[in-house]
Structure formats: structure tokens, C-alpha cells
């Protein structure tokens, strides 16, 4: 996906590229999430239809490793999220 996007001159802000992190989170693909984030894909992008971020989708589908990546390595804020409430 990244190779094809670069060949077409698309940037990481292009919608399908941003959505790919959400897909990686839903599928629990840690390696794809790491690759996308290494290319500066916006970890805070939310799906317009439901307002969910990659972190929300990974948590919903039980992909702890992807959640850990987003929280620890890329400093995705938990403030105001269900995860934040559950921690308190």
C-alpha cells in the first residue's frame, strides 16, 4: 500500500493511507501498524463514521499489542477515552 501510494505521489495525509492504520488496528497487524507509524501516518486519525481511532478499534477487537504500540511508543492520549475511565 505504501509503495503504491508513493508511486502515485500520495502523501501520508491522503485518506486511504490514514485509514490503513485503522484497518491494521482492527486486524491486529502489529507489523503493519509499525510500518505505517514509521512513515508518520497520523495515529490520532478517527474514522468519520463512528469517531473511533486506531487505539479504540484495536482495544475493541482485543489487540493488546497494537494498543501498547499506540499508547507507549507513539504517545496516543487516553484522556477522555473508555480506557482512561477503566484505569481509574
Image: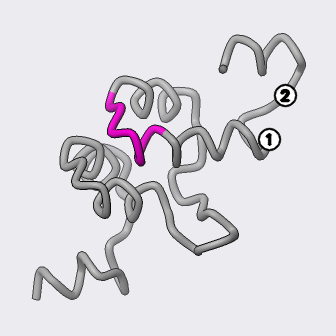
Label 2 vs label 1: CA separation? 6 Å
Residue at left 69%, top 11%? 3
In the picture of the structure, the residue carrying the numbered disc 2 is 10
**Viewed as shown, does residue 15 lie left or right of 9?**
left
On-image quarter of the N terminus: top right
Q: Determine the main secondary structure of the stretch shown in magenta.
A: helix
**Viewed as shown, does residue 38 lie left or right of 27?**
right
Mark 1 closeness class: few <14, some 14–19, many ≥20 residues within 10 Å = few
Cβ–Cβ under 8 Å for marks 2 and 1 = yes
Residue at left 41%, top 59%? 57
Establish if 78 lies above or below 6.
below
Q: Nearer the viewer, residue 50 or 13?
A: 50
Colour style of the rendered protein structure: one colour
Q: What stretch of residues is rendered in magenta?
A: 24-30
In the picture of the structure, the residue carrying the numbered disc 1 is 14
Residue 54 image point, x, y percent: 46, 55
Residue at left 58%, top 36%? 40
Residue at left 78%, top 21%? 5
Spot the residue most to the right. 8
Mark 2 closeness class: few <14, some 14–19, many ≥20 residues within 10 Å = some
Establish if 38 lies above or below 77.
above
Amino acid at each position: 500500500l505504501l509503495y503504491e501510494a508513493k508511486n502515485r505521489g500520495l502523501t501520508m495525509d491522503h485518506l486511504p493511507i490514514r485509514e490503513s492504520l485503522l484497518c491494521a488496528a482492527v486486524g491486529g497487524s502489529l507489523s503493519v501498524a509499525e510500518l505505517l507509524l514509521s512513515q508518520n501516518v497520523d495515529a490520532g486519525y478517527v474514522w468519520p463514521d463512528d469517531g473511533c481511532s486506531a487505539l479504540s478499534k484495536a482495544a475493541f477487537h482485543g489487540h493488546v499489542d497494537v494498543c501498547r504500540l499506540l499508547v507507549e511508543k507513539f504517545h496516543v492520549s487516553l484522556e477522555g477515552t473508555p480506557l482512561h475511565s477503566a484505569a481509574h
